[in-house]
Image: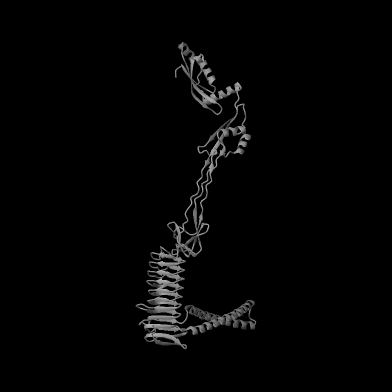
Amino acid sequence: MNNNTITLQGKDLEKLIMEAEKYFNTTRDNINIEVIEERRTLFNKIYKINATIKFVPELNKMEKLLNNIEYDLKGLEENKLEDLAIESDEESGKTIDSEYEITVDKEGMEAYLTVYPPIGGKEIDKEDILKVLEEKHIKSGIFYEDIDKIVSEKKYNTKILIAKGKPAIHGEDARIEYNFNIIKEKKVRITEDGRVDYKDLSLINNVDEGELLATIIPATKGENGEDVYGNIIKAKDGKKISIPKGKNVSISEDGSKIISMIKGEVKIIDNKINVFPIHTIEGSVDNSTGNIKFVGKVIVKGNVLTGFTIDADEDVEVYGVVEGANIISKGNIILHRGIQGINKGELICEGDLIAKFIENCRVYAKGNIQTEAIMHSVVYCGKKLEVLGRKGLIVGGEIRASDEIKAKTIGSPMATITSVEVGLNPDVRKKYDELLKEKNRYTENLGKLSQAVDLLTKLNQKGELSDEKKEMLNKSIVLKLQTQKALEDITKEIEEIGAYIEDISNGKIKVENMVYPGTRITIGTNCMYIRDQIQYATFYRVSGEIKIGSYEP
């Protein structure tokens, strides 16, 4: 910049012009003044001007004068100028009141107050703060207690939160709380001895009739908010959901609960809750399914592998082969291709049993049994057992039925030992056999106790027993009396069951083709051993003897 122009900066515009007059040694009429910057500091305004002299009659003289004047404003810093301005104000006796600055965030949710201290003027005042807030249209969420504190503590030059808006609270969407596992995850069970049971995977969600399946938590209303200017901030209401009602479920009167109408398996299909009375396995029961425990009917399209268990409250139907597995049903069992139990398999049902064949397994059915062959198995039938079809074979093992056994062939030309029995309910027979075993145990124990009591009594009579041995004698006598009483009760019960067996032993064994040697026929308490082949026969009991008559279809 040439010597015709000077840049000055300071608080008082009038003083700056006077400085320019002094610098150019002329009057303001001969100077062009340009305000190039005007800004506000914490306390006052700061001006920056360019002063240019209009004409220079004696330029050389002026330049020489300027070179001799040590007046350089370029090194002055802004804060020094400000201090000079303040000092100038103080020197001039001018006063400034407390000043208030309000700033609001861009969302309009928070307002801040900064108070600048006075210079000899009015101190911070609550009414002035409220007036400034009103001018700035701040009307909501004002912290009046904080204002009192700011005033009482004279908090200057600090940015303080003075008002805060109320944010909108959006409503929560409706949701469903399920009372069953909705994530199909295989969960293995750890046994008491620390082993992992990979067959118990708990993949079926069993439910009972009337069981609560899910609860619907309704959507909630939104709550509007308000910014510091008092403007309403709209809130969104939560989204409603449709009731996921599927098959065999009902909805409570208030629409908040989903309840099962039947016993079965609960599943979510197409986002709806369903309960199915039948659990169908498209493949085999193996490691992919684990053991099956279901409150309804179970259908298996494939096989049931060795070591696995099906436990159902209703029927079990298997289209493939059952290996060394366990099937337990409170209904019926239907095996389209039979069971090859490899001496491990077991079938238990409270209804009827229908199987293509039964081999090397144990069977207990309270109802009827129908099959084409029974081989080397232990079978208990609560009603009628029929071995029909092309083979109609019973060979090996132990077969018992309450009412009747009907077969084409019993035993084999190899004289395989085969036992068949009728006329007694398997449950009664089982109880009778258990009582006989228990009687033998009590009899044996009574003999041992009698010997001990006799020996200790003799020693006591000779005065050779210590106090400890005398106590043992007393305990042995008491135990002997208890054992005698128990033995008497068991003997009485055996006699009663034996009399019952005699009364009901009128079942029949019918053989359409051949009974081979090695077969033992039992009806009630009577037995017959077959030593020669017998054809087309019916075995029945009359007057305490087993008779053989012609075959009765």
Would you say 547 lies left or right of 70 here? left
| Image: 260 above or below 64 | below
Which residue in the rendered view is the most extreme toward the left?
390
Where's residue 141, x and y in %?
57, 40
Is residue 103 in sight in this rendering?
yes
| Image: 15 above or below 179 | above
- When asked about the image quadrant of residue 396, the answer is bottom left
Quarter of the rendering occupied by the N terminus? top left
- When asked about the image quadrant of residue 302, the answer is bottom left
| Image: 226 above or below 2 | below
Q: Choose between 233 and 397: the one closer to the eye.
A: 233
Is residue 157 in sight in this rendering?
no
- When asked about the image quadrant of residue 479, the answer is bottom right
Q: Choose between 452 and 434: the one closer to the eye.
A: 434
Q: Choose between 450 and 10: the one closer to the eye.
A: 10
Which residue is depicted at the point 58% across and 23% down?
Answer: 89
Quarter of the rendering occupied by the C terminus? bottom left
